[in-house]
Amino acid sequence: MKKLIYIGISLLFIFQLYSCNESYLDTVSTDSYNEANWWQTENQAISSINGCYSVMRNAQISQYEQLMEDNYTPNSYSHGGDVVLATGAHNPGNVASFRNKWDICYQGIGRTNNVLDNIDRVELSQTLSDRIKGEAHFLRAFYYSTLVNYFGGVPLILESPDFAEHSDLPRNTRQEVINQVLQDLDEAVSLLPVSYTGSNIGRATKGAALALKARILLYESRWADAVNAAKQVMDLNKYSLFPDYRGLFMVENENNSEIIFDVQYLVPEYAHSYDVYLEIQINAAPTLDMINSYLMKDGLPMDESPLYDPENPYENRDPRMHQTCVIPGYMFMGKPAVRSKYFSTGFGFKKYTSFKDNVAASSSSPGTNDINYIILRYADVLLMYAEAKNEDGGPDDSVYEAINEIRARADMPDVPEGLTKEQMREVIRHERRIELVMEGRYYHDIRRWRTAEVVMNANALNIEGDVVQTRSFNPARDYLWPLHEVTIQENPVLEQNPGY
């Protein structure tokens, strides 16, 4: 059943974002919702936790802003508003996302804090009470981990929003925030079920909490702990790779065996504009470097494989190339794609669009795509396990098994045996780039690997090999985003990140 957990009563959450200390207000309104009369019924409790999820449909979490982040990696190019990040021309005042991502994450944190502070006021079954608490802990961990990935240490707030108390807090250290994130995830693991049925499909599960924990530990280079968390997901025996890589990102296959956690959408109530940004307006276009990074079908790079034909450079490639990218001359939307449409680089993205290769585009208006945005899927868990296990002790059999399972789904040959730790590291990093392109992961990968200063100090090229963008990455500054100047104006206690 598709995406019913967000359909219900429309609520105002103003009281979740602000609190009031005027003790002289003794009258309790009975004809509108407020703090005094809200936390009374099961439906109100469920609506409150649903409000914590609804924040995730913001552009900064699961819509175009998230997808566009590949534009400041070697994967993709845009001529749009995110050009300043790709070229290193950003500052604390010229990118709206610096403020918007901060604000939307704290909105989510405020709502989860409000749930955790008030849920025990409602008479609920122990099972439902535990589940709602587990969901809130998971979501708070997600929002704080998002802030840490972009900004480093941030103010750590664990109580319901109080403007007077919380408007001038200093930044906690990154480690303090990470410690709280891991504590929240451990609590979520202990409280959440393994799975849901019916209209509850889409809520956070035990596997989602473990997978997010594995990601946080991986990003912190805590290899052994990351191995353990990822292995716990694998040992649940609940998840498996969906057999069709292209189909994984089609609406008819949502909530399949590979999905661990996603943001649920449903037309007409909740739609997004992936089709517009990826295919109609072409706000993200694969670079020549991205296309050339796809191996040949024999598992070798273009310049080493006897299968490569310069007259037919897009033949005999890793099948994920044609399942992910639009290539001129090859079928898409019922006809051969033409170079002139993909004016940015000559290539386009199929992933996360509703369009298919051999089916003409619908005449319905664009912007009604409702494919769920995937935050955690099993292939990523296998890759996290392989990376952490390799870094912890080198490439044992389980590392090969994890990588080869993903390559088998792609109809690619196994990884060669006998690789060193360093060689396997490069294989895993390449596999992450190919498998997870346009999923909001690679930007974080090149920063945590500290390779951004190499791969982003290079030109972005189009299909003809011409420069479309000269890029710049300052390693003394750009591994973190700046706090927006308005954010600091609102709270002058906050210290700006170095270099800004």
Image: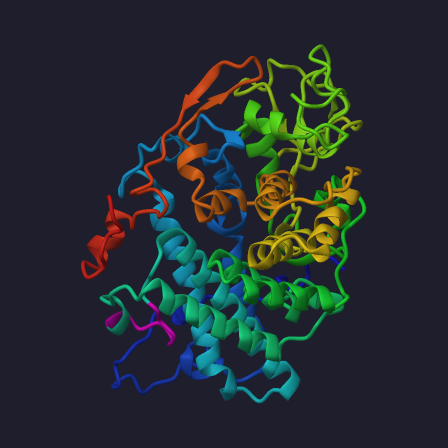
Residue 426 screen position, x and y as percent: 58, 41
Identify the image quadrant of the C terminus.
top left
**Front-lying residue, 392 or 173:** 392
> Could you tell me which residue is drawn at 34 percent across and 49 percent down?
99
Vertical order, 414 against 303 (above or below): below
> Could you tell me which residue is drawn at 33 percent across and 74 percent down?
19
Vertical order, 453 against 48 (above or below): above
> Could you tell me which residue is drawn at 61 percent across and 67 percent down?
229
Outermost residue on the top side: it is 311
Q: Is residue 264 left or right of residue 400?
A: left
Vertical order, 265 against 119 (above or below): above
* Total residue callouts: 0
Vertical order, 160 against 473 (above or below): below
**Front-lying residue, 265 or 294:** 294
> Could you tell me which residue is drawn at 80 percent across and 38 percent down?
411
Snapshot quadrant of residue 425 = top right
- Residue 368 in magenta? no
Does residue 298 appear in this view? yes
Residue 324 screen position, x and y as percent: 67, 34
Identify the image's colour scheme: rainbow, by chain, secondary structure or one colour: rainbow
**Front-lying residue, 354 or 437:** 437
Q: Is residue 48 left or right of residue 147?
A: right
Magenta stretch in the rendered image: 156-164
Identify the image quadrant of the N terminus.
bottom right
Residue 164 screen position, x and y as percent: 24, 72
Q: Is residue 249 left or right of residue 25?
A: right
Residue 489 screen position, x and y as percent: 20, 53
Snapshot quadrant of residue 475 = top left
Instruction: Name the main secondary structure of what is drawn in magenta.
Output: loop
